[in-house]
Image: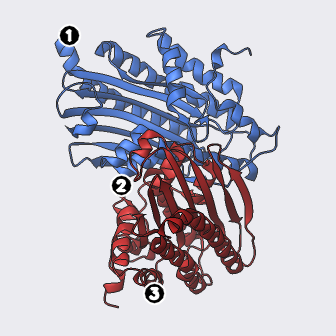
Chain colours: A blue, B red
Amino acid sequence: VAYFAAVDIPARADELFRSLQSQICAGLEAADGAARFVEDAWERPGGGGGLTRVLTEGALFERAGVNSSTVHGELKPDFAAQLPGDGARFFACGVSLVLHPRSPRVPTVHANFRCLQRGAALWFGGGADLTPYYPVREDVLHFHRTWKAVCDRHDPEFYPRFKAWCDRYFYLPHRRETRGVGGIFFDDLRRDPERDLAFVADAGAAFLDAYLPIVERRRGEPWGERERAFQLLRRGRYVEFNLLYDRGTTFGLKTDGRTESILMSMPPLARWEYDARFPPGSEEAALADWLRPRDWLDEPA
Amino acid sequence: VAYFAAVDIPARADELFRSLQSQICAGLEAADGAARFVEDAWERPGGGGGLTRVLTEGALFERAGVNSSTVHGELKPDFAAQLPGDGARFFACGVSLVLHPRSPRVPTVHANFRCLQRGAALWFGGGADLTPYYPVREDVLHFHRTWKAVCDRHDPEFYPRFKAWCDRYFYLPHRRETRGVGGIFFDDLRRDPERDLAFVADAGAAFLDAYLPIVERRRGEPWGERERAFQLLRRGRYVEFNLLYDRGTTFGLKTDGRTESILMSMPPLARWEYDARFPPGSEEAALADWLRPRDWLDEPA
């Protein structure tokens, strides 16, 4: 029975991620209220393919990209050496999204859930992290509390471990700051495939609950040229992280992945300014204090 | 005599690069006609420092950055292993610039000249490459002819070798295109220090001659929203190259270089669009044909 359950896992994970993609897109379209997702199905020359869904120029989102992919084939030796399992054959499926809202008052968010198989090894990875431009404490707490609740239902060690992992992963050493206020990040999760799949399914299903209440609280708040300029500058940091440090992005681009789908995480517009500084006490200067690992849920209110 | 000449080279190269920075900035200010360079002198904690000069929101340039730096100290072992010479001590000086014009009709340009010393080894590197948005054949020919003339005065093998090196270096494999129409690129030049310094001095002095005539021909040409949108999209490729592949940028950022000076090469504003396509026959679609290695000077007119 365990054997059949395990061989079934990749197909069930694949089904889960596709259905998650549909549910998330439907929820985001409803929240946007104006634009719809456009679909682009693609095939991978080495085996498999994906479905890229993009919403652009919406009322809420300047760009929202939600990708699913199911790929299989042969691993290159130098990459294979970094992975669990044995042999050159691999299978990978997942869903990944980056949402770039138009309003600087609404945070950018990223989430990704994936299942990989190589020889006898099967493992899961994923996470979600929030990148506000003008952070609000209750939003950050809501985001972290949602992930903690999901994690705690599966393993009380998950949240502290995956929260710290997120802080380490989404870090820009050359800026000495985190990408945003974190969330959870995990990789190489392989306890029992059934339990791991159940956790990932639970986490995926929590994404809209973690993000949309923040959107609803902030989307009506006023902003102008100043906030827009700051948002574009901070989006430049997002670009820096993705192209310099994000393993999914750099690995994908350097190993003949589908460029357009990988770079859907790029913001629609980003700005760089030499040595930008902000007046002490300004909202913009205050952001720095949020961009370091903090135990949000343990801090005094 | 040879001994004294050689020990003198780093100081003379340093003097050359600083004076080159002043001359180039003066020439660019004159061409811009509206904005002036702002200076920012900085020190490097490990030893040395630099002078960053930035012109922003000019009549011609949206941003022009011209850096000089003179640094020395101890090499980290993993980096030292990749370099000629012996020992941990190093000295490096150089000048580097990236100019982002406002008009999409005027090409972006980059140039860099540097001198490095480690133990008994002393070598030079540098180059210049042009990134047009709407390329014009006579401009590309002028740029390449200028560099060929400089190279030929020193060694007839330089231009073909450094031109090909430039095409290889400024290449984006994930886009299957070069960054622009090339120019020259060279590294690890160490024949005779006197002759190498003379070549680098000659090349540095040619920069304004290589670029400004192109600016003067194109700056008056009309452009609108469409050309601006295309320029911003192509600047996204510039960002991709710099953060994914440029060794100076990635090495600098990952080894505690001065972030703001390194990232002065970033464009002031850049755009990404999912799977952008242009109508066959449009000027935008035509760019692809320029972004592959071509023997500009040997093609029939």
Residue B57 in the image: state x and y as whole percent.
Answer: 71, 67
Residue found 17% across the figure and 15% down from its top: A4
Label 3: few (<14), some (14–19) or many (≥20) C-alpha neighbours in 10 Å? few
Q: Are marks 1 and 3 on the same chain?
A: no
- In the picture, measured across the screen, residue A36 lies left or right of residue B33, that is left
The relative height of residue A170 versus residue B7 in the rendered view (above or below) is: above
Q: Are marks 1 and 2 on the same chain?
A: no
What amino acid type should be assigned to the residue bearing mark 1?
Ala
What label sits on residue B174 in the rendered view? 2
Residue situated furthest bottom in the rendering: B301
What amino acid type should be assigned to the residue bearing mark 3?
Glu
Q: Quadrant of the C terminus of chain B?
A: bottom left
The chain under label 3 reads B
Q: Secondary structure at mark 2?
A: loop
Can residue B160 be seen here?
Answer: yes
Give A164 or B15, whichever is nearer the viewer.
B15
The chain under label 1 reads A
Question: Where, by quadrant of the figure, is residue B185 drawn?
Answer: bottom left
What amino acid type should be assigned to the residue bearing mark 2?
His
Residue A85 in the image: state x and y as whole percent.
Answer: 23, 24
Residue under pointer 3: B138
Residue found 42% across the figure and 76% down from its top: B282
Q: Secondary structure at mark 1?
A: helix
Residue under pointer 1: A2
Give A6 or A274, whichever is nearer the viewer.
A274
Q: Which of the two discs, 1 and 2, sits closer to the camera?
A: 2
The relative height of residue B138 versus residue A148 in the rendered view (above or below) is: below
Cα separation, mark 1 vs mark 2, equals 41 Å
The chain under label 2 reads B
Residue A77 in the image: state x and y as whole percent.
Answer: 22, 38
